[in-house]
Amino acid sequence: QVQLVESGGGLVQAGGSLRLSCAASGSIFNSNAMAWYRQAPGKERELVAIITSAGSTMYVHAVKGRFTISRDNAKNTVYLQMNSLKPEDTAVYYCNVWPALDYWGQGTQVTVSS
């Protein structure tokens, strides 16, 4: 059974930081690249960052230098450290494998106030 459980979101002022966590079922985590995605109000869901099973990372331009994706293979958990947050980072954040499965967790809301 696929499980993706995101946590760690909240309300933060611009310039602040948050650390998101995602616990994934082992069946999909161990050998797959994992990714964070986000969906802002009225917009399509978009890719934010990817981490391969070996630890290589990729970031979209909008978050490069501010966000860091990491994974703990022993805990089947992927993280997203978000620093220097901006109001345009406001969105529901989701984790999934990359490329994404059709199944999505509930996501975690991140709201950045100006």
Image: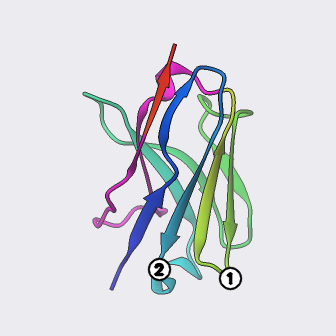
Q: From what the image shows, is residue 48 above or below residue 103?
A: above
Numbered mark located on residue 74 in the image: 1
Q: From what the image shows, is residue 45 above or below residue 76?
A: above
Residue found 66% across the figure and 73% down from its top: 53
Eye-nearest disc, 1 or 2: 1
Q: Are marks 1 and 2 in contact (CB under 8 Å)?
A: no
Residue found 65% across the figure and 35% down from its top: 17
When asked about the image quadrant of residue 43, the answer is top left
Residue found 51% across the figure and 63% down from its top: 22
The amino acid type of the residue labelled 1 equals Ala
Stretch in magenta: 85-109
The amino acid type of the residue labelled 2 equals Ile
Q: From what the image shows, is residue 107 above or below residue 44?
A: below
Q: Quadrant of the N terminus?
A: bottom left
* Residue 61: image location, x then y, percent: 62, 31
Read off the residue under disc 2: 28
* Residue 95: image location, x then y, percent: 46, 58
